[in-house]
Amino acid sequence: MKKYIIICLLAIIPFTWGCEDDFLTTTPDDQLTVEAFYRNVTDAEAALATVYAQIGAGDRWNVTEVNFVVEHFRSDMCMPGPDRYADWTAISTFTNTAGNSRSTTYWWDAYRGLNHANQVIEKVGEMTDDKITPEERAHIVAEAKFLRGFLHFRVLNNWDQVILQDAAPTSEEDLAKPLSDRAAVWALVEQDFKDAAAVLPASYDNSNVGRATRGAAIGYLGKAYLHQAKFTEAAAELKKLVVDGVGSYELVSNFMSNFDGSNENNKESVFEIQYSSVRSNGRHIGHVTGKFTSAPETGGWGNIEATQNMVSEFKSEGMIANTGKYDSRLYATLFFDDADVDVFGQSFEDVFGTGSDRAIYRKFTLSDIVESDNAAWYSSQNVPVMRYADVLLMYAEALNETGTADAAKPFIDEVRQRADMPALPAGLSKDDMRNRIMHERAVELAYEGHRFFDLRRWGTSILENKMQNSGKPGADNFNLSSHAFFPIPEAETNTNGAL
């Protein structure tokens, strides 16, 4: 199977700006400019690959030490482990500033990807039929629009004040742009996902698995609507995946196989970022998530751990699973102090000591199924960023907000059934169902980068309450005005004269 998205170029073709002197403005014969680069479909595909590289962070360290830190460490259910950097801890304890290196890198990675996406949209769109077929041109532009929507969605999730990047810069002056109205950025996100969904296929052959699909565009359009509390629109889009069968998605029977590398690009995967353990042109196109997640006692670095708040959330319904235990997702998500927990063939007590209250993530941990000591440094394990379980829960939420709790119930029950949990009772009120959905998203999607953003979109009072009662170190520093979003990076304000 070819993993298309891992293709990386060492550098995007640079923009060139002219001078008055004819000699200085002459293009050397041995160099490719932007204008000369887009010669055929191979060049267009290579340019598109640079955008995919950016959504994967473009660097094996950034996958975890930037993306995972930014998307997880503010949550009430995650905190730094025993091995951490000061700027990680600052994000987790809400003492971060505009100079934080992790949020700054996340911002630059996103905007670098947006510039690449805009270049593909514009330059491939201008390619003539003698260079590329109309079908190939439309498909590549649609993929680039999906990725532009995806990257803008990431920026909107993390910053209240953002810059709309809807065109590639053609001069140095274009690099400085003022802040944009959030509604305008959301409008472009919606349009990009709509445009992508109108062109992209529902699936690919094995040689192209991993590329953005129609289902991914529809799923993210539904998610974008949900984040704006446009519940009617969200329900209409997500229905296409859940009821109408676009993409033919299903839950896989083995929950853990979504995260251990044994069942990549499966029928539950709506969109996942592809990685490889090989090296290409001296570049690493894998990542180190296994080491990042695993505790030192199990061969990792101990960079992240779960809070007891997460354990409590999983246990909140009691031992009502049809296994006679707690929710089965608890045992698949965490290593914690329980007689039934197996830690790579040993008991929790044998590995972490008697009476330990630590909770270590199992998702993405090192496993002898897919990892070796060498491969752990260049892991090929894909990272799912949207699963069908997420779609089912989003659809249920949209139905509950626009209709009745009973209309939402079957889709939550479908997710619960895989976890060996009983169906929800009939006749719940809308408020009770909303609380049930909040719980289901917490336990189903733990350590997948959704929690903090879910809490914020559910309301500032919910976000504030959960953060201040999380029990994690530094949580009492949280306040809505400073920490609901990141501040614009200092590096941006220092270099962007339009701000």
Image (cartoon, helix red, strand yellow):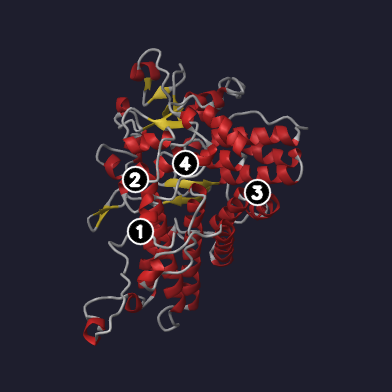
Disc 3 element:
loop
The location of residue 132, given as percent across then percent down, is 43, 78
Q: CA distance from mark 1 to mark 4?
A: 41 Å
Q: Are marks 1 and 4 in contact (CB under 8 Å)?
A: no
The location of residue 212, given as percent across then percent down, is 49, 59
Q: CA distance from mark 1 to mark 3?
A: 34 Å
Q: CA distance from mark 2 to mark 3?
A: 32 Å
Say which residue label 2 marks.
101
Say which residue label 1 marks.
495
Disc 2 element:
helix
Q: Earlier in the sequence, mark 4 or mark 2?
A: 2
The location of residue 93, given as percent across then percent down, is 42, 32
The location of residue 279, given as percent across then percent down, is 26, 53
Q: Are marks 2 and 3 in contact (CB under 8 Å)?
A: no
Q: Nearer the viewer, mark 4 or mark 2?
A: 2
Say which residue label 4 marks.
258
* Above or below, comparing residue 340 to residue 1 in the picture: above
Q: Earlier in the sequence, mark 2 or mark 3?
A: 2
* Above or below, comparing residue 265 to residue 27 in the picture: above
* Above or below, comparing residue 205 to residue 72 in the picture: below
Q: Nearer the viewer, mark 3 or mark 4?
A: 3
Q: CA distance from mark 4 to mark 2?
A: 31 Å
Callout 4 environment at 10 Å: few (<14), some (14 to 19), or many (20+)?
many
Callout 1 environment at 10 Å: few (<14), some (14 to 19), or many (20+)?
few
* Above or below, comparing residue 409 to residue 491 in the picture: above
Disc 1 element:
helix
Nearer to me, 215 or 110: 110
Say which residue label 3 marks.
229
Residue depicted at 33% across the width and 34% down the height: 368
Q: Earlier in the sequence, mark 1 or mark 2?
A: 2
For the residue marked with disc 2, what is the amino acid? Ser
